[in-house]
Image (cartoon, rainbow, N blue to C red):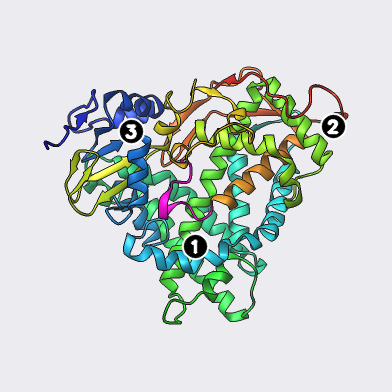
Amino acid sequence: MKARSIVTAPGALPVLGHALRMRKNPAKFLSSLAAHGDLVEIRVGPWKAYVVCEPDLTHQVLVNDRVFDKGGPLFDRGREVAGNGLSTCPHRYHREQRRLLQPAFHRGRLPAQAGAMTREITAVMEQWRDGNTIDVLAQMHTITSRVVSKTIFNSDAVSEAAQIVREAVDVIIGSIFHRMVMPIQAINRLPTPANLRYRAAITRIHDAVTHAADEYRRDGCDHADMLSALLAARDHNGNPLSDQEVREQVITLLVAGIDTTGVALSWALNVLAHDDELRSRLHREVDATLRGRVATWDDLPHLDLTARVITETLRVYSPIWIITRTVTQDVDLAGYFLAAGSTVAYSPYLIHHRADLYPDPERFNPDRWLSDLPQRRPRTQLLPFGGGPRKCIGDTLATTEATLALASIAARWTLTPPPGAPAVDVKANVFLTPRNLYLRTETRAPTKPGAGPPVGTPTPPSSIP
């Protein structure tokens, strides 16, 4: 049978391809691709990729990670920083690495990790003042970077190294996307100021992690953190991880854990700032549960609406918006022929905004995720953490952190747009981040029990700001 033809997305420019469209309005560009077919070719600078636009085909790519291996421009740049860490390593290394790291993400460690999250969330909020205007993305980044670094480096003896690592990660994340879409890749090797900053950040982060590991080996203590778990891990031959392997895993955890959760929290706060009804519902839930204090691990079962707001945020504003894979052998994907060496991409954002999967997909409606709905959505329809064998190992850790942070902020503060605030728009980098997101802080007291409709009462969904 003749292979199905793959359509190229319209609007490609010479040399640049679709790069300008992706950077100018990535959401609109991605959403438009499904209209052209289940598999659509895009071109970005020197490379091209076949974007999977249909959920079942996306699922096939995710579960068959031997054929659709980690690779392509995104992971080529990622390996410059994290080497063969868990998120960037090829298929042949993944199973062993995941086995080594799994104990660090065991559910039994979550209560202690949640305690560290609560302390760091509180420390940041205590710097806020009534009536001030905050840069929301910067503040959420501060929370998540403190949480993630504390989860990895829990010893005060390496606090300076942790600070160096956080600063270096910021430089790296800000550079990867631009290096990925550079039309002439040789420019990435020139001694430009941006390239020199990028290389210096990689050197600093490598040196800082090595120093922290040396300190841990010297004191011989288990600090109940990720670095201690990595140093205690043994491979199938009983050997400890090398310095390089420890460094690669730490960098992977930092890059994956800081910005994704910070971006999601920022978008959630932006939605609440523009939706009075949803904000009131959330306030009633946190007031009934927290009564003005910050959220803890024991509160999570009672924060159902808060958790659904996070889930809907991850649907509407998928921080990870496009991910590449490399085809390792000639393959037939639902009638499409893909040659070995081809780059395939999938987009959680695209899948999450298909109207046939999510009626009125541009509406922010956390009640889509009510537990008593007659039918649960297939896993192929919600992909903020990927899927298949390479699904993010820290998904539960990330959603726990986001739920605790959102509930704690809502318990103590009302955040609303200040007069004359610029319009919020989207910046495309490795993540889809909000730009110009500034909100005014107002302290609040818990509402009295019984005020307003019951906490679980759905309200009409809001239009996305």
Horizontal and vertical percent for residue 264? 55, 38
Query: Residue, x 56% and y 33% (percent of image)?
Result: 312
Query: Residue, x 30% and y 57% (percent of image)?
Result: 66
Q: Which residues are magenta?
A: 383-394
Q: Picture quarter containing residue 157? A: bottom right
Q: Quadrant of the N terminus?
A: top left
Type of amino acid at the residue the image marks with label 3: Cys
Pointer 3 residue: 53
Q: Is residue 130 visible?
A: no
Q: Picture quarter containing residue 80? A: bottom left
Type of amino acid at the residue the image marks with label 2: Ala
**Mark in the foreground, 3 or 2:** 3
Q: CA distance from mark 1 to mark 2?
A: 40 Å
Regarding mark 1 in the picture, which secondary structure is present there? helix
Q: Quadrant of the C terminus?
A: top right
- The mark that comes first in sequence, 1 or 2, is 1
Pointer 2 residue: 445
Pointer 1 residue: 250
Badge count: 3
Horizontal and vertical percent for residue 192? 31, 47
Q: CA distance from mark 1 to mark 3?
A: 33 Å
Query: Residue, x 61% and y 66% (percent of image)?
Result: 225
Q: Does 11 sit above or below residue 293?
A: above
Asked if residue 384 lies in the magenta stretch, the reply is yes
Regarding mark 2 in the picture, which secondary structure is present there? loop
Relative depth, front residue between 94 and 432: 94
Query: Mark number for residue 266?
Result: none
Q: CA distance from mark 3 to mark 2?
A: 46 Å
Horizontal and vertical percent for residue 411? 77, 36
